[in-house]
Image: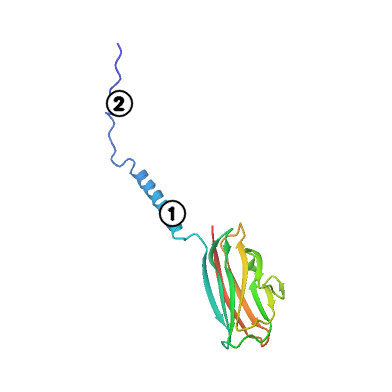
Amino acid sequence: MTTAPPRDPTADLPVDPSAGSRGIWIRRAFLSLLVAIVVLALFGFFGVHSRTVAASSGNGDLHVDVHYAQVARAGLAVPFDVTVRRRDGFDGDLTISVSSSYLALFDRNSVDPEPAGGRADERATTWRFDQPHGSTFVMTIDMQVQSGQHFGRRGFVTVRDQGDGTAARATFKTWLAP
């Protein structure tokens, strides 16, 4: 004599009302995280964010603005512009120094305008420009973040008018997103 299998094999198992609730919350949390990442990306949170810092000489004659990438990622081109203003024009050649450790984060393609000279050591890379005409000078470095760079660094720009030795120094920090 053979017995037929029961028609509803789970009829004798009690149903646990809390079963699966942890899995539901884990899925909800994961989907919420994905939505947050997409929304942040839509608003440009993960791109390059630039900022401008300013500094002046002690006597106020020389003013420097450094426009740089405050947040960036490896492989992206970043802005780096140094604008120098001198109230009554420049008295002589101009030197601009940028911290070498900061510049090591980037692949540098060019400096515009072309410097008349320069030197580099472990502390700073310095470019010399012939006496600028007028009261404003702008130097731009074309560069992008090297691959494999993480966390970022602090940097500085020091500008000196060689005519009378007036100097100004600006400091900043770039954070590199993973």
In this view, 7 is above or below 33: above
Query: What residue is at 33 percent from the left and 44 percent from the top?
Result: 21
Disc 2 crowd, CA 10 A, few/some/many (<14, 14-19, 20+): few
Residue at the top extreme, as displayed: 1
Three-letter amino acid code of the residue under disc 2: Pro
Q: Are marks 1 and 2 in contact (CB under 8 Å)?
A: no
Q: Position of residue 1 (x, y in %)?
A: 29, 11
Q: Quadrant of the C terminus?
A: bottom right
Q: Identify the image quadrant of residue 133.
A: bottom right
Q: Nearer the viewer, residue 79 or 105?
A: 79
Disc 1 crowd, CA 10 A, few/some/many (<14, 14-19, 20+): few
Residue behind mark 1: 38
Residue behind mark 2: 9
Q: Position of residue 51 (x, y in %)?
A: 52, 70
Three-letter amino acid code of the residue under disc 1: Val
In space, the residues marked 1 and 2 are separated at their CA atoms by 45 Å
Q: Earlier in the sequence, mark 1 or mark 2?
A: 2
Q: Position of residue 90 (x, y in %)?
A: 64, 85
Q: Nearer the viewer, residue 138 or 18?
A: 138
Q: Position of residue 92 (x, y in %)?
A: 68, 85
**Does residue 36 appear left or right of residue 1 in this picture?**
right
In this view, 141 is above or below 131: above
Label 1 sits on a secondary structure element that is helix
Front of the two marks 1 and 2:
1
Query: What residue is at 60 percent from the left and 59 percent from the top?
Result: 149
Label 2 sits on a secondary structure element that is loop
Query: What residue is at 61 percent from the left and 71 percent from the top?
Result: 140
Q: Identify the image quadrant of residue 94.
A: bottom right
